[in-house]
Image (tube, rainbow, N blue to C red):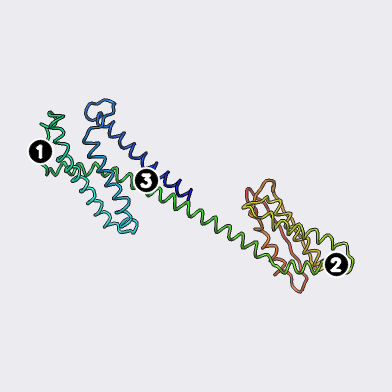
Amino acid sequence: MKLTWNIQWQTAAMHLLFWSLLILYQAVSYNWENTDQLGFRLVPQVIYVSIPVTIVMTYINLYITMPLYYYRRKYIQYALMLLATLFLSGLSMRFLTHTFILPWEKVHDPLRYARENKHFWIPVRIFRMSLQTYPVIAAASLLELMRKAYIQEKHLRALEKEKFSAEIALLKAQINPHFFFNTLNSVYALTLKGSAMASKVVFRLSHLMRYMLYDTGADKVLLQDDIDHLENYISIEQMRFADRLDLSFEYSGDIAGKMIAPLLLLPFIENAFKHGIEEDAGWITIHLKVSGTGCF
């Protein structure tokens, strides 16, 4: 709820900034065009006609025309509706000017009123007023498309992150439970024999379980920690198979400070033991090479 409220406030602030800049431009451009001086002046034609009509037509385009046609890829219909919107904006400006501004100028600005064409239907002026609206509508539409693209990209990144987290969680869940049962059976057999290796297996197994239960909740862990975890796993398997397994595990490269998703490498090692050893005997060679910022 708080996030939605913040987004609404941000959107409102962006709209307010956009229209403030437009009003500022209108105030400055009037003096540029009429007096060739830098100044700020808002005439009634701009305050009561140009800006209100432009705002209304812009939002009609943003929230009615674009959702109905542009977002549905009905581009021809959208182009026709945009032309109709522009014509309606010019016609509306002419109507407001003829109905309200001309009577106001008659009283407050007789010289300007005397120069004005008193006819309502002036096609060239209506066309010119329509063209004045188009840059604003186009700019607002472009900003809205950019905003939607940003939100969509952000949403896709969030989905990718969720997918990655789900994949990591799946990898964690895929660790063969038979490994634990077999290890416990091996510990049981070693204890019956009174072997000193039983305590070593229990020690490594406890570290392995602690790492899996408590240290893999983060998105990234130190590569060195994950390698230590792999060594515990490999040592337990090596104790189980003893001289029936010819095993080699080594790694190279600069691993200091490198990060990796937790348990990302374990399924490869586990599958090597699960599928690479036939009739409880065989050989496994594991080589981990760290190159640059990645590990291979």
User: In what element is the residue under mark 1?
Assistant: loop
Q: Which mark is residue 190?
A: 2
Tell me the amino acid under the disc marked 2.
Answer: Leu
Which residue of the protein is positioned furthest toward the front in this rendering?
Answer: 1
Q: Percent from the top left, x then y, of residue 181?
A: 75, 69
Residue 185 appears in which quarter of the rendering? bottom right
Tell me the amino acid under the disc marked 1.
Answer: Lys
Instruction: Point out the tag, 1 or 2, that comes first from the N-terminus.
Output: 1
* Point 90% across, 66% down: residue: 194
User: In what element is the residue under mark 2?
Assistant: helix
Q: Nearer the viewer, mark 1 or mark 2?
A: 1
Say whether residue 126 is visible.
Answer: yes
**Residue 22 sits above or below residue 211 on the image:** above
CB atoms of marks 1 and 2 within 8 Å: no
> What residue would you read off at disc 3?
143
* Point 69% across, 58% down: residue: 213
- Please state if 175 lies on the left or on the right of 187 as rendered: left
Which residue of the protein is positioned furthest toward the right in this rendering?
Answer: 194
User: In what element is the residue under mark 3?
Assistant: helix
CB atoms of marks 1 and 3 within 8 Å: no
